[in-house]
Image: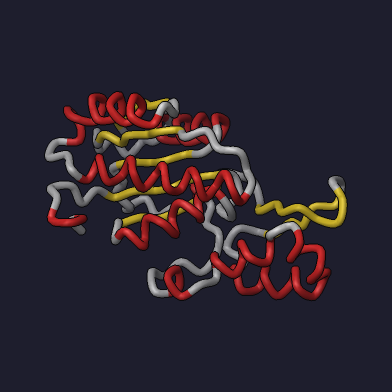
Amino acid sequence: IVLWGMPGGWQYATVCSSNMNRSMEAHYQMLKMGLDVRSFGTGTNVRLPGPSQDKPNVYEFGTPYSHILEDLKKKNTPLYTQNGLIKMLERNNSDIFHNSGKMSPERWYDMDAKLRLDVVLTYEARVFDAVLQDLQGNDKNNFQGVHVINIETKDNHDEAVISGKFTCGLCAKLEGLTDIDSEIVAALDDYQQQTKRPLVYTLVYC
């Protein structure tokens, strides 16, 4: 995929803890740009707010978004409408994801080993660290460079939307690069200066 006739066409992944909010909002906006993107979570399972802090809604990765949506509606439609979970799940269960084959939250560690990624975008420091640890422990020895970028984002709807727009602006800049390995550092520095929002970046060979 080449965005707007630009030289890029990189393969992206967005990653948060549960593959529900931050990674999915960025995934959603990036799909609308025509980018080649997948999304994942690094958690043990998918955790969503419940009726109280000590009673979260917990699902296994791979549980369809449609199932989670219907389950929350059955449990307490007014509560989960008020706190935004219904709207979030409706986005995750929308046609733009269905058409791209994205039906459920996917766990980073269960990713197809053949999937090639150029850029991984994370939205929390501990997720960034988990992704780095996993890539650095990868024994495929393909010596392919993977550019891992953290965009620290609070886990709520409004911040996810803002972060998604920031991500799309960043990706538009990356899509303009001919040689991402040699040009990305300057592009990231320029984007941080332009937006006044900090990024954490690491190049991993795996």
Whether residue 165 is visible = yes
> Please, is residue 86 above or below residue 169 in the view?
below
Res 153 → quadrant: top right
Res 205 → quadrant: top left
> Please, is residue 58 above or below residue 66 in the view?
above
**As rendered, which of 26 and 158 lies closer to the eye?**
158
> Please, is residue 112 above or below residue 204 in the view?
below
Q: Position of residue 44 (x, y in %)?
A: 64, 46
* Quarter containing the C terminus: top left
Q: Position of residue 169 (x, y in %)?
A: 34, 44
Quick check: 123 left or right of 172?
right
Whether residue 64 is visible = no
Quick check: 141 left or right of 23?
left
Q: Position of residue 68 (x, y in %)?
A: 67, 68
Q: Residue at x 34, y 24 (%)?
A: 193
Quick check: 165 left or right of 171?
right
Q: Residue at x 68, y 66 (%)?
A: 86
Q: Residue at x 33, y 40 (%)?
A: 170
Q: Residue at x 59, y 70 (%)?
A: 90
**As rendered, which of 87 and 122 lies closer to the eye?**
87
